[in-house]
Image (cartoon, helix red, strand yellow):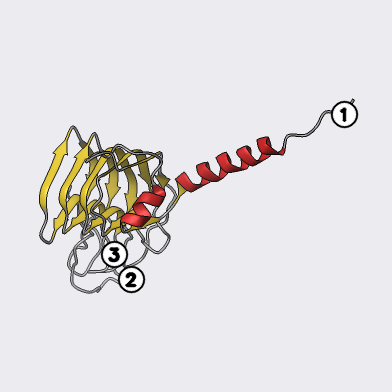
Amino acid sequence: MAVARRPVIVVLAVALLAGAANAQGGPRLIDGDAALAAAASSGDGTAASPYRLTNLFLKPGSDGTPCLTVHGTTAYAVIDNSACDGTLAPPSAGVAATGVVLDNVANLKLSQFTVRMLVGAHGSAGNATGAVALVLRDVSNVALDRAFIDTLSAGDCSPPAGPEGPPGGAGGSVYGMLVLGKSDQVLIGNSRFFQLHAGAPCANGYGGGGGGGGG
């Protein structure tokens, strides 16, 4: 006797694969509370349990777009067990390599979030680009808990083409975190920042020079 097929199993498998694909890749933009709700996998960001996003594994865009941008949200939410990984992502000329941007955001926690291997682009005097793990602009009640920031490298100032090059210039800057605008109630706990390297400068008229660290 032939056994009846069960198409519902196929549907479930497709749904699971679609959910996994949604958590991978990058960059990703969450713009407003409706987008935050749509992206959430469950509740418990609290104030009485709005949103939780988990297992996001993202990469920066080839045009320098950050791994993750959250804009204009006020609902309570936590993003946890997630990562921004710039490994194998080529640096973008003229644009800083950026991990996460929180812009005009309130009531958000990043927990167990890793940002690693962001690399700025080398450039001639004044054109080397930097690297920044986290940008917080006009935020309120934002927390960073058990974050791990590892291996950020700004671009070097490239040596001039000839022996009589332009005046010396700085390499790119590197920042673990930039807090901008009118930001309030930013809490950082149990987080680690490793291997942050500013770009090497050009010497006046010639290439070379050493670089410093950043934080």
The front one of 208 and 41 is 41
The front one of 146 and 148 is 146
The location of residue 2, given as percent across then percent down, is 87, 29
Q: Secondary structure at mark 3?
A: loop
- In this figure, which residue is indicated by the disc labeled 2? 161
Determine whether 155 is above or below 23 in the image.
below
Kind of residue at badge 2: Ala
The location of residue 185, given as percent across then percent down, is 10, 47
Which one is in front in this view, the residue at disc 1 or the one at disc 3?
Answer: 1
Mark 3 → mark 2, Cα distance in angstroms: 6 Å
Q: Secondary structure at mark 2?
A: loop
Mark 1 → mark 3, Cα distance in angstroms: 74 Å
Indicate which disc, 1 or 3, sits on the residue closer to the N terminus.
1
Q: Quadrant of residue 201?
A: bottom left
Q: Residue at x 31, y 59 (%)?
A: 32
**Viewed as shown, does residue 79 lie left or right of 176?**
right
- In this figure, which residue is indicated by the disc labeled 1? 2
**Viewed as shown, does residue 4 lie left or right of 187?**
right
Kind of residue at badge 3: Pro
Rendered image: mark on residue 159:
3
Determine whether 54 is above or below 178 in the image.
above
Is residue 215 among what the camera can see?
Answer: no
The answer to whether the residues at label 3 and label 2 have Cβ atoms under 8 Å apart is yes
Q: Quadrant of residue 40?
A: top left
**Viewed as shown, does residue 70 lie left or right of 27?**
left
